[in-house]
Structure formats: structure tokens, C-alpha cells
Image (cartoon, rainbow, N blue to C red):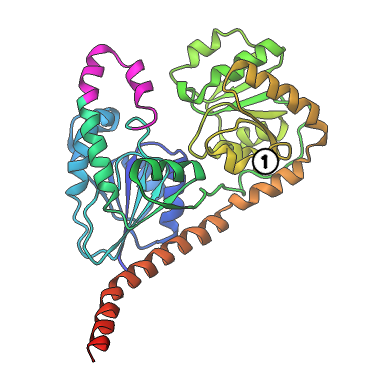
Amino acid sequence: MRVAIVHYWLLAERGGEKVLQAIANLYPQADLFFCVADTDIANRLFPGRRVHTSLVQRLPFSKRLYQFYLPLMPLALEQFDLQGYDLVISSESGPAKGVIVPPDALHVCYCHSPMRYLWDHYHHYMDDAGSLARFAMAPMFHRLRQWDVTSAARVDAFAANSRFVRKRIRKYYRRDADVVHPPVDLNQFALRQRTPGSAFADAYLWVGQLTAYKRPELALQACRELGRRIVVIGTGEQEARLQSIGADAVFLGRVDGDQLAEAYANARALIFPGEEDFGITPVEAMASGLPVIAYGKGGALDTVADGESGVLFDTQSVDGVCRAIRRFEDLEARLDRRRIADGARTFDHENFNRSFLQFVAHAQQRQKNNETAPLAAQAICRHSDR
């Protein structure tokens, strides 16, 4: 079986790329297709693989300005020649599913999210853009939405990374999807002994990109109001503004895997106030035994058990986070870190591999049934004629 895996762009090593790598490991013979790719990252994550890039790759400064080339990506995807492939797997968050596959090939899509800047985050992006950008974005995104819905019809079966994303696939594409949760590396994140005198002891923790939609300011402002210490791991365009909030906060920027594991092992809890499609960070934290204080919408509803592995709150505000922290502190002594870590094992690579292969097998069986259905109908008609 010839397999092609299509991903939107390979320019960083984030959650989507970890899932991509897990899928690629299931199909070691698969060829890889990207709109734009960083060669060093591709060689590191997929050594020895055949990697194809689109015409966008050859445009000026494509690795830095790839988002400005978004209107060209539908055309670029359709230029990929997938003749001869039996299975095409698209990994969707930016445009990826719009490839044209042979009529007898199976096309399955693992959807991290329908493109948020086209759909539920569209007005947030418009509000943050300048007047000239808004003028260009409105007609451009209108056409991209039309293409996005049209290209959804090219997919034979969808897998969503959470129930939240499955709901959005149904809303925007009018398609159903199986839920296949992303895998977490439990070899890197596991329960470990706390380190005496750790810099993370008695501190709350924020981990992630410091961008507006993740709402890091809620965690910092809540800790400031309650007089709690917080350690911030990550960088982003909001960093300078967040440092001016005046909380008792330590900003560490990017850290390596060992330091992140130490943070998870020694902090009091991870604060996760954003609405995420899935949210790999809370699962990494819980795999390390760390409780999570999370906004009770989006992917957190699939991962955080309220009162068992952490606390969910329903108001995305400073007051909502403050109430959640107080509730967590009332429960803190009763939360069992070993039980939290054991619960996170349902998101390990083994479960992902089994679920994804099952999803593909079911899609193949449905395709086979659809191909034979007309023949069965003809046989019934011939029998009735007799």
C-alpha cells in the first residue's frame, strides 16, 4: 500500500507536529507533503523520508511570511501529484485536506481544528488587524471559507482530536468525525519525586505560547490578586505586556525537557485558562502527577476530571480563575498525584496508535462496502426480474 501524508506547514515542533510524527511512525513507507517546510526540521523528525513541498516553498521568504501566502495554498495543494497512492492522510489545522486524490484512493483527515482564523476566531483576528489588513482579509477569507467547505467534501473520513473539534467539524463542514486523542510522550513526562528546594515549589505554573487567545493574563492577574507566586514558561508577543502586570512571577522563556519535567514535578498546579482544541500541555502535566486548573470548555473537558485531576471553572475571567484557585487549595490535600498520573496513561502512544489504525481500518471497510453496494443492488434487481 502506497501512503501519502499531507501536513500544512512544517516550521516548528509543536503539538500538531508531534501528532504528525506519530502518524508517520505508523506508516514508515509513507511520503510526506508540505505547503512549506524547514529542511532541518524535516530531516530531524523524518530521517530518510521522501519530502515534497509545494510551489509556495519557492516564493520569497516563504518560511517567515508563509501566512501571507495563505491565498495561494489551495492552488498549491491541488498541484501535488498523488497518482498511485492508495491511502492519503491529511493533517489539518491550516490548509491540508484540499489535495486531489485518485478516485480509488482513501482520503482520511486527522483534524486538529478547522482553520480557526476562518471560522470561530475570525472576528478576533479582524479586531486585532489594522484597517488595511481588514480591508484585504474580508474578501480573501470569504473565498477561503468557500474553498475550505468544498475541500471537506474531498475527505472520505474525518478524525477529530477532541469532542470539541468534532462538534466544530459538524458545525462548519456538516460532517461527522471519530475522536482520536493526540498521544503524549509518557517516557518524558512521568511521576517523579519532588526536588527539595526546587524553584518551582509552592508556585503555580503557566506553560505555553504567550499569545492572546491562550489568555495568560488571567493566570497572572489572578495570582497577583491572591498573592500567589507563578512561574511562566514560554515566549510570545504578549510577554512584555504580561511582565508589566506586576504579579509575583518568574518568566523563564523556553526551557528544555528536563527543566519542564522538573517544573511539572514540583509546582502546585498548572493554570490553563484558554479555550483549546485539545491542549497537550495539561495532559503532559497530569502525566507528571500535576493537577490542572482549567477553563471548562474545549479540549479540557476530554482530559481534566473536575475534583479528581484538577479543577474546572466556567467563567473565563480573573474572578473565575481566583475562585478556581481557592477551590483547588481546598481540595489540594485530597488530590492523589499518582492517581492523576495513572489517569493520563489513556493518552499514551499505544492508545493513539490503536485508535488511529482502527479509524483507518473502519474507513477502508466503509469504502469497500460503498464500492460493492451497487453490485449488490444490481443482483437484487436481476433476482426480482426472474
Q: Is residue 154 left or right of residue 55?
A: right
Q: Residue at x 62, y 52 (%)?
A: 346
Residue 230 showing in the rendered view: no
Q: Residue at x 41, y 62 (%)?
A: 360
Q: Position of residue 150 (x, y in %)?
A: 24, 45
Q: Is residue 10 left or right of residue 81?
A: right
Q: Residue at x 58, y 43 (%)?
A: 302
Residue type highlighted by circle 1:
Ala
Q: Position of residue 318 (x, y in %)?
A: 61, 16
Q: Residue at x 80, y 27 (%)?
A: 330
Nearer-the-camera pick, 140 or 228: 140
**123 inside magenta stretch:** yes
Q: Position of residue 37 (x, y in %)?
A: 30, 41
Nearer-the-camera pick, 291 or 186: 291
Q: Residues within 10 Å of mark 1 (few under 14, many from 20)?
A: some
The stretch of residues the image draws in magenta is 119-138
Q: Mark 1 sits on what residue?
A: 305
Q: Is residue 78 left or right of residue 282?
A: left
- Total marks shown come to 1
User: Hey, which residue is sitting farthest right in the picture?
Assistant: 333
